[in-house]
Amino acid sequence: MTLHAASRDALAAAELRLLEVVDATLDSAALGKLGSELFAVVSLLSAQPALRRALADNSSGPEAREQLLHGLLDGKVDDVTVQVLATVVTARWSSPRELVDGIESLARTTLLVRAERDGKLDAVEDELFRLGRIIAGNHALELALSDPVAEPAGKVALVDSLVAGKVDETTKTLVDQLVREPRGQGVVNGLGDLASLAAKRRERSVAYVRSAVELDAAQQDRLEATLTRIYSRPIALHVEVDPTLRGGLLIKIGDEVIDGSVAGRLASLRRDLAG
């Protein structure tokens, strides 16, 4: 998500308000409800261009925008949801779309805080990554979930058939919203971004590791410790098996690629010989 300067300031203020609310007395269920209601508002504003323009209209006063918000949502969502959104609509956003982007970001943060408090953030991060790999490996499934003309309810039902009873509730809510409201983002990239957000929540970088064979827990622990030492910061591993590598590992951290695979070394040798 890329925001202009005014929107970045608005989101920062809204995140502070959100953290104030979260640090109060909200339990896990209340956090889940807050995240779901914020997502519902994202869906509403995505479907109502005139409404999102009115809520982001900097030519009207903040009080008028807040009054519009109360008229729209009072009695329909929890008071705490309205409190967070009041901070959003009274701020100055660069565009109506970026206002909606901000609300979506707040919803995701709320749900990841919930997972963190419940001690499930690691599991949520891993589930998001693995689901992304599963979908990326099934072209027909990826097309069905990314079809812009398909009914959102049908796409959500398709995802639910894959994950129901197999993932944490927070994972399910995040994924359901992604396929219901992709907002121009592909489902595989969206799942990757969500997994990275979960990793960032723990102030860790993500290392995407492709291995020719399955790595056991001890091997993963050693690799994580090595990368953490090399990069001088905590590193979270996402490992997938790729037999085409023939042997070794291919590691991608941000824009940096460490290719220790047999296939990578052979490709490098061929380039050298060709030169």
Image: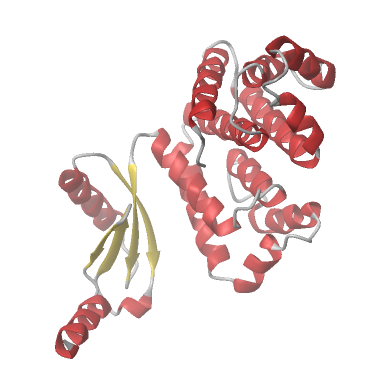
Residue 108 drawn at (x, y percent)? 57, 35
97, 107: nearer the viewer: 97
Residue 78 lies in quadrant: top right
In the rendered image, the residue lying farthest to the bottom is 274
Q: Residue at x 63, y 45 (%)?
A: 172
91, 226: nearer the viewer: 91
Q: Residue at x 37, y 59 (%)?
A: 239
Residue 111 drawn at (x, y percent)? 57, 32
Q: The C terminus is located in which quarter?
A: bottom left
Q: Is residue 142 above or below residue 273?
A: above
Q: Is residue 231 above or below residue 80?
A: below
Horizontal side of 110 relative to 129 (left or right) equals right
Q: Residue at x 29, y 66 (%)?
A: 250
Residue 194 drawn at (x, y percent)? 51, 45
Residue 19 drawn at (x, y percent)? 51, 18
Q: Residue at x 50, y 62 (%)?
A: 133
Q: Is residue 234 above or below residue 209?
A: above
